[in-house]
Amino acid sequence: PIYLIQDRLVPKEEVRVSPDDRGYYFGDGIYEVFRVYGGKLFEAEAHFKRLERTAAAVRIDLPAASSELKKQLEQLIAANSLIEGTVYLQITRGTTPRAHAFPAQAEPVLMAYTTEVKRPVHMMQQGIAVVTMEDIRWLRCDLKTLNLLPNTLAKQHALDRGADDVVLHRSGLVTECSASNVMIVKQGAVITHPADNLILHGITRAVALRLARELGIPVAETPFTLDDLRQADEAFVTGTTIEVTPVISVDGLPVATGNPGPVTRRLQQAFEQAIA
Ligand code: PDD
């Protein structure tokens, strides 16, 4: 595999990372996961906009303009002959001996690589089981930073209970999942947490909401409760690799009939057309 390190394409075996990278010490960095369909970046502009927003919020200078970074990722995709998969891009604040204060000099460290990933057809057809869990993260969940310990603990919590993922909530108000956004359908309307500081502003979330509006499906970006989730007509998650995937059970109890619902299916079909 070929990696992008700063602005150079290098074989993975030749990649060298310093133990003083602030990504190791503090999770002091930011990232994006892009989907690649047919060799092309999906929703590239939206991902770069989010990257720029996160970078500004945590005061990391991007090593190049988004237009330049996009070209470099396209070269990375070509170098790896990637057709279907993902691009992982991370930028840490830089490399200096451990100290909390920002380094005076350090250059941000950029690293990106590609992974071949097939579309999760089985999960998208069958749906997933979720368990609920208190959302113990900080109050800037809108920033895509490397600090993902709560997310990894949450994902493992679900797997340990035989479920596929968690639905996180703050005192009963549903936020999102460990690495995806969550929506319910109630009386024909799609409901999801507003894009504020408590959730990641998912690119797939935005695509799904846009498709819903185009289909004339009412959309409400408003908080909903665990009870709303349990009593929903349908539920589904959205994310870069998981696309639009039905949720068929919550804490071991079926959502409605326990089968993917019609609104979810319509959005899946529309998504399929959007990526073709
Ligand atoms: N996760 N919420 C969280 C906490 C996420 O980490 C992600 C993405 C999403 C969905 O966002 P998008 O539709 O832009 O992928 C929501 C990525 C894929 C990850 O960390 O691997």
Image (cartoon, rainbow, N blue to C red):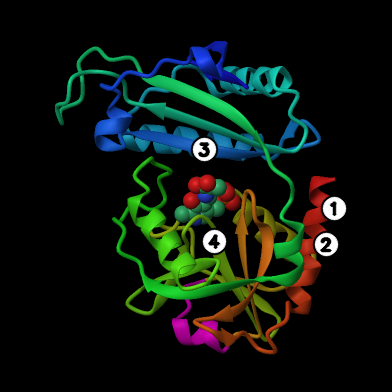
Q: Secondary structure at mark 3?
A: strand
> Is residue 210 one of those drawn in magenta?
no
Q: Does any atom of ligand 1 lie closer than 8 Å to the CB of label 1?
A: no
Q: Secondary structure at mark 1?
A: helix
Q: Amino acid at mark 3?
A: Glu
Drawn side of residue 62 relative to residue 119, left or right: left
Q: Amino acid at mark 2?
A: Gln
- Give the residue displayed 38% in from the left and 40% down from the top: 146
- Mark 3 or 4 closer to N-term? 3
Which residue is under mark 3? Answer: 32
Query: Which class describes the residues within 10 Å of circle 2: few (<14), some (14-19), or many (20+)?
Result: few
> Whole-Å distance between the Cαs marked 1 and 2?
6 Å
> Whole-Å distance between the Cαs marked 1 and 3?
24 Å
Q: Mark number for residue 269?
A: 2
Q: Mark number for residue 273?
A: 1
Which residue is under mark 4? Answer: 181
> Are the residues tagged 1 and 3 within 8 Å (C-beta)?
no
Image height check: is 38 above or below 106? below
Drawn side of residue 144 relative to residue 1, left or right: left
> Are the residues tagged 1 and 2 within 8 Å (C-beta)?
yes
Viewer-closest of 88 and 189: 88
- Give the residue displayed 55% in from the left and 24% down from the top: 66
> Are the residues tagged 2 and 3 within 8 Å (C-beta)?
no
Q: Does any atom of ligand 1 lie closer than 8 Å to the CB of label 4?
A: yes
> Whole-Å distance between the Cαs marked 2 and 4?
18 Å
